[in-house]
Image (cartoon, rainbow, N blue to C red):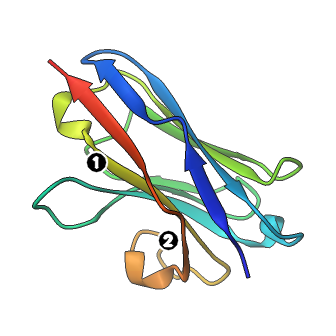
Amino acid sequence: QVQLVESGGGLVQAGGSLRLSCAASGRTFSRYGMGWFRQAPGKEREFVAAIDWSGGETHYADSVKGRFTISRDNAKNTVYLQMNSLKVEDSAVYYCAADRFLPTMTRGVEYDYWGQGTQVTVSS
């Protein structure tokens, strides 16, 4: 079992930056691939970024490539999402997710464990 708690969301102006954190419980965090997803009001949940257990493989949605960076610190049981050059359309609730078996790492249905989400609001 893995429990996930996101933090770091907030209100920021367009062009600004935020860093989200996702703290995981459990001693086997380093065995889990991790992902970030987001959901805006009235829209479906969408993939944002993912990282494998070692940090050696990452994936990004086209909409965030070059602006967002996912990373992890297995010693701290934490995964991060550094978000730069934020746009109004990045506003959403951001969720982190975890699972050990991730064939694509980009599909939400592959993840069994989810956090409660953190709100990111980007103003124009």
The image quarter containing residue 14 is: top left
Which quadrant is home to the C terminus?
top left
Res 40 visible: yes
Distance in Å between CA atoms under marks 1 and 2: 15 Å
Which quadrant is home to the N terminus?
bottom right
Residue identifier under label 2:
105
Q: Is residue 63 left or right of residue 115?
A: left
Residues at discs 1 and 2 in contact (Cβ within 8 Å): no
Res 67 visible: no
Residue identifier under label 1:
62
User: Amino acid type of disc 2?
Assistant: Met
Circle 2 crowding by C-alpha within 10 Å: few under 14, some 14–19, many from 20: many
Label 2 SS: loop
**Is residue 2 shown above or below 118?**
below
Q: Residue at x 48, y 62 (%)?
A: 116
Q: Which residue lies most toward the left here?
A: 42
The image quarter containing residue 26 is: bottom right
**Is residue 75 shown above or below 114?**
above
Q: Position of residue 17 (x, y in %)?
A: 42, 20
Q: Is residue 42 left or right of residue 82?
A: left
